[in-house]
Amino acid sequence: MTKPTEEHPESISVWWAEAVEIDLQQIGGRTWVLLKPDVYIWPRWARREASTFLDRRMRGRYNGPANALMSAWIELLLPGTPRHTDRTLTSFDHVAGPGNPTFVVNDRTGFSKGGAR
């Protein structure tokens, strides 16, 4: 439950869910789809109060666990085909033109296993 404040005088239930932020960025002349796993808190203004919960929930999300989480999100967002293959995404089937752009994406992550220095 939220703590009542001047701005939000009534106490309400706080909800959370695993989430992913999706961003497109141009890097080195190529467009990248960037995924940032997060924990969504509702209402949004309660996120500050949930900082201890968020710290516990996200603790240890490094290297192997982060790669597993990222792979799970990729599987949810791009299901049904073998890993590390190009996929063509479009909004509408059988419609060509600027109102229906086509994107080719690959699910390969930037994760790398430790190697020799």
Image: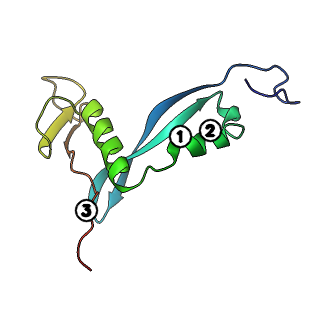
Relative to the observer, which residue lies in front, 69 or 74? 69
Mark 3 secondary-structure assignment: loop
Badge number at residue 18: none
* Residue 3: quarter of image: top right
**Which comes before the other along the chain, label 2 or label 3?**
2
Tell me the quarter of the image containing the C terminus: bottom left
Q: Amino acid at mark 2?
A: Phe
Q: Position of residue 15 (x, y in %)?
A: 60, 24
Which residue is farthest bottom? 117
Q: Who's the residue at 12% across and 33% down the image?
A: 81
In this rendering, the answer to whether 11 lies above or below 65 is: above
In this rendering, the answer to whether 115 lies above or below 4 is: below
Left or right of 12, for residue 29: left
Q: Position of residue 114 (x, y in %)?
A: 27, 67
Which residue is farthest right? 6
Evaluate if marks 1 and 3 touch, with contact meaning CB atoms under 8 Å apart: no
